[in-house]
């Protein structure tokens, strides 16, 4: 009878040990998934901040290049041409319609739509053939200031 009780106790401990090991593996998997999600969220936050900083600085370059062209003394055609190129490059292509096909995961489309709408534009995004998304943003260009 004692051997049976010892055997039953050992068997119970083994089942508990196996259940605890399985629970531990599941917790490790969940911890890894949470860490990956946290990294993705942080990358998105950093990307948004970086975008905001770059967009602000490019906007300031365009404004300063335009202002410099207006206050420039004399003809200086090379300087005027350089300032016009800087301003035009910062404003983007004619029509402000840029099409890009990437292979991202799709995160950030809501934020991109909101930013486009804040500027009076719109954004279209759709799955692309072969994976990823095709994103098209249309943003209004400010009217050129008259000299």
Image: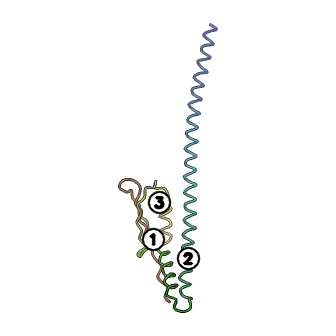
| Mark number displayed over residue 121 | 1
Outermost residue on the top side: it is 1
Q: How is the image coloured?
A: rainbow
Tell me if residue 34 comes above or below residue 119 in the rendering: above
* Residue at the image position 63 percent from the left and 13 percent from the top: 6
**Which of disc 3 and disc 1 is earlier in sequence?**
3
Question: Which residue is situated farthest in the left direction here?
Answer: 129
Which quarter of the rendered picture does the N terminus lie within? top right
- The residue at 56%/71% (across/down) is 56
Q: Position of residue 29 (x, y in %)?
A: 55, 39
User: Quick check: 15 above or below 141?
Assistant: above
Q: Are marks 3 and 2 in contact (CB under 8 Å)?
A: no
- Give the percent coordinates (x, y) of residue 122: 44, 68
Provide the residue designation for mark 2: 61
Give the foreground label among 3 and 2. Answer: 2
Q: Earlier in the sequence, mark 3 or mark 2?
A: 2
Above or below, 118 against 127 in this view is below
Q: Which element type, helix, strand or loop, lies under badge 3?
A: helix
Whole-number angstrom distance, CA of label 3 to CA of label 2: 27 Å
Mark 1–mark 2 Cα distance, whole angstroms, equals: 22 Å
Residue at left offset 42%, top offset 58%? 102
């Amino acid at each position: 009878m004692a051997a049976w009780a010892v055997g039953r106790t050992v068997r119970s401990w083994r089942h508990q040990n196996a259940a605890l090991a399985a629970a531990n593996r599941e917790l490790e998997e969940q911890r890894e998934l949470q860490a990956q999600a946290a990294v993705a969220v942080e990358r998105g936050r950093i990307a948004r901040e970086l975008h905001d900083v770059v967009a602000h600085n490019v906007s300031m370059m365009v404004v300063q290049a335009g202002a410099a062209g207006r206050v420039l003394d004399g003809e200086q055609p090379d300087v005027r041409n350089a300032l016009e190129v800087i301003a035009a490059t910062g404003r983007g292509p004619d029509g402000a319609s840029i099409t890009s096909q990437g292979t991202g995961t799709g995160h950030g489309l809501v934020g991109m739509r909101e930013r486009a709408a804040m500027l009076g534009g719109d954004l279209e995004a759709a799955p692309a053939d072969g994976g990823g998304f095709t994103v098209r943003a249309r943003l209004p260009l400010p009217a050129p200031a008259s000299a």
